[in-house]
């Protein structure tokens, strides 16, 4: 068994339950993501996956059943009191105060973690513990926040077996020997993977823009991350921002140290090989590096493994794009909502200020007329 089977996320637990209860094969296309998750459970020894395509099937192992029996709270009961917590937060309008001490925070953090599996958790929302007070005077609250991973599924991305005509960006990649980052034996496969991304992007509302020297329209870059994204073999643009995608082959161990050429010296090797400190050892293991908004600092890096190919990981990339797009749109809506709320409060304050000004002005006018009346009355009495 590879990784620790106790560390399962909510999706893996749901797939493990699905396999135990009713899985005899792959259902509709929406279950494509379940097949990928089942592979991860297979590596942990919790399920056995057999076949491909229409013959795909999975069955739970004795270890998988033991895991479900050992974790009944998270796997089947929705976390015990966590469903009560979800109910309380919903009844409180999405914000529930839970206390000021660290013990209350720790207890509710565990309930919040379990609430991911609660059956009454609203789809597209999850709970979080936040400090609504200050650093030296905390006030911990459980709030309901958006969770877009519930709303986006992994849909298949077909990889072409043969390409009749490459996308201009992919053709530029094939023509630029210095930036290929893949040995000659695996270059065609790398190009097919890039072509699959370029073909699928427009179907998902993602624009393929010009990376480097191609015949596509010029790319406008405004930020450092966008300039980094422009260095990719493919550059994609979504409403969340721009993403740079590079593909490379991982080198195997045992490469001998190589001497770099000095400036001006001629070399027959490609630039990506010339810049290495050791000789490149071909492995055929390909990796994608996806850089852009929402990705890790060093990029999202899916690669070939012993159980799943890079082509099978492409749906995850587009799922991430969609999640980040929804998050960006939600942040923009929240900014607009808060700006509108600030504007409404400002207009209400101005209206109140105008009303108070008019009231003060009427009082001053009244007081002035009163003083004049008293002066006239004293003058008459004196006369």
Image (cartoon, grey):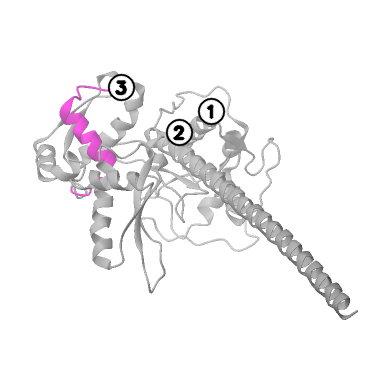
Disc 2 + disc 1, Cβ < 8 Å: no
- Residue furthest bottom as drawn: 382
Q: Nearer the viewer, residue 189 or 268?
A: 189
Q: Which residue is mark 2?
A: 189
Q: Is residue 81 left or right of residue 259?
A: left
- Residue furthest right as drawn: 383
Q: CA distance from mark 2 to mark 1?
A: 15 Å
The mark nearer the N terminus, 2 or 1, is 2
The mark nearer the N terminus, 3 or 2, is 3
- Residue name at image x 39 percent, y 40 percent: 149
Q: Which residue is mark 1?
A: 199
Please identify the quadrant where the N terminus is shown.
top left
Q: Nearer the viewer, mark 2 or mark 1?
A: 1
Q: Quadrant of residue 123?
A: top left
Disc 3 + disc 2, Cβ < 8 Å: no
Using the image, determine if residue 334 lies above or below residue 206. Answer: below
The mark nearer the N terminus, 3 or 1, is 3
Q: Quadrant of residue 304?
A: top left
Q: Position of residue 196 (x, y in %)?
A: 49, 30
Q: Quadrant of residue 105?
A: bottom left
Q: Is residue 181 left or right of residue 346?
A: left
74 inside magenta stretch: no
Q: CA distance from mark 3 to mark 1?
A: 22 Å
Please identify the quadrant where the C terminus is shown.
bottom right
Q: CA distance from mark 3 to mark 2?
A: 21 Å
Q: Which residue is mark 3?
A: 53
Q: Position of residue 108 (x, y in %)?
A: 26, 56
Secondary structure state at the residue bearing disc 2 = helix
- Residue name at image x 71 percent, y 41 percent: 218
Q: Position of residue 60 (x, y in %)?
A: 14, 32
Region rendered in magenta:
6-26
């Amino acid at each position: 068994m590879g990784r620790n089977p106790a560390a399962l996320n909510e999706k893996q637990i749901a797939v493990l339950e699905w396999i135990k209860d009713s899985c005899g094969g792959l259902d509709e296309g929406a279950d494509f993501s379940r097949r990928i998750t089942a592979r991860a459970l297979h590596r942990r020894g919790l399920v056995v996956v057999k076949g491909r395509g229409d013959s795909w099937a999975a069955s739970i192992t004795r270890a998988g059943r033991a895991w479900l029996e050992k974790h009944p709270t998270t796997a089947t009961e929705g976390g015990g009191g966590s469903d009560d917590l979800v109910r309380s937060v919903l009844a409180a309008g999405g914000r529930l105060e839970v206390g000021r001490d660290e013990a209350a925070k720790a207890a509710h953090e565990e309930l919040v973690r379990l609430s991911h599996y609660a059956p009454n958790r609203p789809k597209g929302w999850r709970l979080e513990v936040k400090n609504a007070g200050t650093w030296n005077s905390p006030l911990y609250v459980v709030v309901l926040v958006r969770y877009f991973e519930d709303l986006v599924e992994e849909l298949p991305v077909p990889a072409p077996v043969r390409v009749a005509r490459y996308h201009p960006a992919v053709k530029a990649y094939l023509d630029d020997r210095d930036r290929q980052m893949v040995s000659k034996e695996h270059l065609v496969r790398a190009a097919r993977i890039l072509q699959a991304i370029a073909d699928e992007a427009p179907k998902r509302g993602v624009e393929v823009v010009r990376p480097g020297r191609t015949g596509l329209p010029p790319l406008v870059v405004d930020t450092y991350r966008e300039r980094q994204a422009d260095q990719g073999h493919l550059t994609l643009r979504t409403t969340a921002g721009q993403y740079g995608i590079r593909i490379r082959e991982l080198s195997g161990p045992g490469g001998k140290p190589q001497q770099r050429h000095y400036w001006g010296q001629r070399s027959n090797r490609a630039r990506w090989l010339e810049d290495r400190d050791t000789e490149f050892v071909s492995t055929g293991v390909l990796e994608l590096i996806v850089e852009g908004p929402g990705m890790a600092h060093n990029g999202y890096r899916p690669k070939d493994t012993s159980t799943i190919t890079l082509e099978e990981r492409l749906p995850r990339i587009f799922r991430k794009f969609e999640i980040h797009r929804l998050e960006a749109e939600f942040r923009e809506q929240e900014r607009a909502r808060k700006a509108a709320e600030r504007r409404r409060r400002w207009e209400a304050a101005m209206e109140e200020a105008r009303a108070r000004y008019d009231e003060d002005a009427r009082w001053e006018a009244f007081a002035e007329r009163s003083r004049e009346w008293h002066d006239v009355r004293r003058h008459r009495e004196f006369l």
